[in-house]
Image (tube, rainbow, N blue to C red):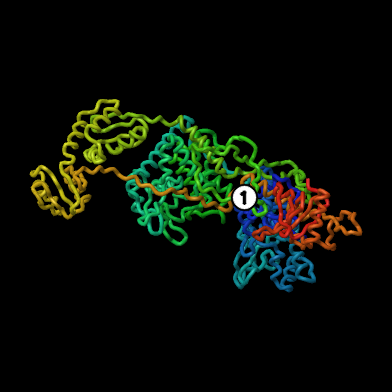
Amino acid sequence: MTTGNPARTLAEELRGRPDTALAGLLRARPDLLTPVPGDLTQLATRAGTRASVVRALERLDRFTQQTAQALAVAPDPCPYDVLAGLMGDEHDTVAALPRAVAELRAQALVWGDEQRLRLVRTARELLTPQASGSATGLGPAAAEVATGMSPGRLQQVLANAGLPATHDPVSAAESLTALFSDPRRMADLLDQAPPEAVTVLGRLTWGPPYGTVSAQPPAHVRWLLDRGLLLPTAPGSVLLPREVALHLRDGRAHRSVAAVPPEPVAAGTYGMRVVDATAAGQAAVAVETVEELLGQWATASPPVLRAGGLAVRDLKRTATALDVAEPQAAFWVELAYGAGLLASDGETDERYAPTPAYDEWQALPAAERWAELAAAWLAATRTPGLVGGRDGKGRALSALGEGLDRGAAPEVRRAVLGLLAGLPEGTAATPDSVVARLRWERPPRGGGAAEGEEEDLRTRLARWTLEEAELLGVTGRGALATHGRALLSPPEEEGPPPAAPEADTADAAPPPPPRTRPRVGRPSDKHPAPPLATSTDAPATPATGATPAAGATPAAGLPTEAPRHPASATPAEARAAALRAARALAPLLPPPVDHVLLQADLTAIAPGPLKRELAAVLGVLAEVESKGGATVYRFTQSSVRRALDAGRSAAELHDFLTAHSRTPVPQPLSYLIDDVARKHGRLRIGAAGAYLRCDDDALLAEIVADRRAAELRLRHLAPTVLVSPTPPDVLLARLREMGYAPAAESPDGAVLVARAAAHRTPPRTPPAPVPDGPPAPDTALLAAAVRAVRAGDRAATAPLRAPQTPQDPRAAETPRAPDAPQTQAPGGLPRTPSAETLAVLQAAVLGNAAVWIGYVNADGAASQRVIAPVRVEGGYVTAYDHTADEVRSYPLHRITGAAELADDPT
């Protein structure tokens, strides 16, 4: 059984770890940082809380989880050799077990030396539930189940098993446990079992360990019950004791051990030129698609649903306009929203429209525009794949609506792309093998979905990531492109890590997640924080002067720290990676062209991406017929009329085509422009309801006689004027449908130029990611937190000087004893009278000594500090604070007490 205070014992082991190990613990379990622990005892206590342990266990890989599960059913404490026996003797298992134990130790889930490995009590309780079998398929130990049996029944079981009688139930349970744990005696006992009884044991061996029996069980089941090989847990329920199951399993805790992660299966291998060209082409399509989407929504903004989000009909209309499927349309809409290019305008009649950032984004080169989209996608927690599904309350999930955030999305995206980056260049992996690898790295809770059931969230996120990466051009033909690899690569070391912040680290909290996307092409941080280095050497004495606790040294041959996975990118790292990706993509994209090739069939071919001004005019003058490496535009009567409505004359259109065509302007196109221009504006429509004016009486008579115009209820007002109760815009559209070419006019008779107004929202920030748990701390915060914990721990454990009196000014240095008067209540702040506090501080100034104080700040938060006083005057003490590593001033009335330390901190 565990003896002593587990948190205190774990704290002693943490005290012997180097600062890099403590920083690794806080990086792997950032929930321990909120707020920063006062000392190592607080850190150890917090590391053993249920919520923190659950989160830590869920983030372990499958083999490390299996190791923890084996420790949960092993004796406490457990020698390393016993653990190795529970895990099996396969070569891969033997080689991987030290790494798994080191990972558990690094995350403060396991402590103790090699002969006394202890799993944190909370983890043991979580991994060995009493109501059902554990993840290993093992049930409770025989001693735990036997406590519910009557003493008489226990003695009968001992007699049937050939064991001597005992005087109490505790010794009876111990005798039964000793029998089940002895391989030789168990083999002799099972040799006497009926074949049917052996079959029953075989069905329960690998779990679940529970079964049901009738009131009159068969003889072979009765034989097992009489000898304790099955123990009753409730009326009609029996259990296979853990020790019996382990004997039947040959001492193994798991039927199969996943010591080695599954390798991705190659779906194909291509040359990098092919991969890069394919991905670059799709990247260009991605940028064009987002531009087309926002261009359409700038003039035809869809409304916001009352409950928030985009209506299904508007999503379908957008999918039709973009010529994509609805799931892809949802992806493009969410991508623009996540990049901060799209938002609601906040008006009474609320609509979605481009933001002012869209205009800035359009001014960037194509490669940088793509890099911004890719960086926003990589960091976004919004999940377009959920659109069309339902939430936990059965409500439909709509694009741009609530309920689409999934905190695990950025991590899964980086994991999938990181896995592709680890393959040979140009190699694509099958989706199932990628999913299998991710399920090993982070096993789903409960073991995942059974056959026929819906896949767990992380599996669906992985599959969506592969599809979205291909759509966005991060991958080409399933293989990671060069610019996609640059999007993931760590930034180069450009200088030393930033200094610790000057804020009070005792009250510090992890920073909130960034609310703005990384802006490509903007100045980036000069000194991005490099990841903390980890050490696999023996733990060194911390710089704060703490010495390793006795018995807390890790076992020889077991590394103190396991290899750490790279943390998610900081904003500075994301900006640097986006810039590198843009530089890698730029040479792969074709340069913008300033010309088209006009064809005799009223089409124009753009041999590449057009310059922005040319594309804007051509988009009004012609309809896009097909996209790809070359875009095909078609000229029609309606498209030419649209250009005339926008205020251009026929001569201007002829000049435009002549200036931007590498081929002569075809005669049919010239005739089309002249014909539409000749008819354009002969009919004028204004507001009455609506009036129709024309100098040609015959044309007006033709319109009135046309049966299709009956619904317009036209009537003569004057020889050249017709009036209608129909609104002008409806009348204009209806006459155009009938084949006429009317033009709208203003009250003064001038033709109205129909330029679509480009709607913009007020300035908006991109949606803030919703992290999966606390955000990852940066290097500066980790360094400050470790320093604060070390200083607080030294303040709580350092020996104090004996109080000085006038009769004995030379006080000997004496460590605190449990029975000696203390200046600190157990677990509290140091407390001394005000006069004694002032005397201690003044003496420390004269003697240049370190002082341990209790301090309560203006918010009422209490903390312990180690300071070196410089002067005491005016109601303040000015001192060097070892916790914050700076000189500070403290009001004397906020100091609860003070005591000198036996040794100055180094």
The residue carrying mark 1 is: 60
Measuring 80% from the left and 61% from the top, which residue is drawn there? 835
Residue closest to the eye, 870 or 471:
870
When the figure is inspected, residue 306 is found, relative to residue 297, above or below; the finding is below
Residue closest to the eye, 134 or 746:
746
Q: Secondary structure at mark 1?
A: loop
Residue closest to the eye, 585 or 469:
585
Residue 566: x percent and y percent?
60, 43
When the figure is inspected, residue 647 is found, relative to residue 330, above or below; the finding is above
Q: How many numbered marks have been drawn onto this rendered protein structure?
A: 1
Residue 272: x percent and y percent?
49, 31
Bin the neighbour count of mark 1 within 10 Å (Cα to Cα): few under 14, some 14-19, many 20 and up. many
**Quadrant of the rendered structure where residue 828 is?**
bottom right
Residue 544: x percent and y percent?
76, 47
Q: Name the quadrant of the C terminus.
A: top right
For residue 113, say whether it is visible: no
Asked whether, in this view, residue 341 is left or right of residue 249, the answer is: left
Measuring 30% from the left and 29% from the top, which residue is drawn there? 660
Asked whether, in this view, residue 382 is left or right of residue 785, the answer is: left
Q: Amino acid at mark 1?
A: Leu
For residue 38, say whether it is visible: yes
Q: Name the quadrant of the N terminus.
A: bottom right
Measuring 81% from the left and 61% from the top, which residue is drawn there? 822
Residue 453: x percent and y percent?
48, 55
Residue closest to the eye, 730 or 890:
890
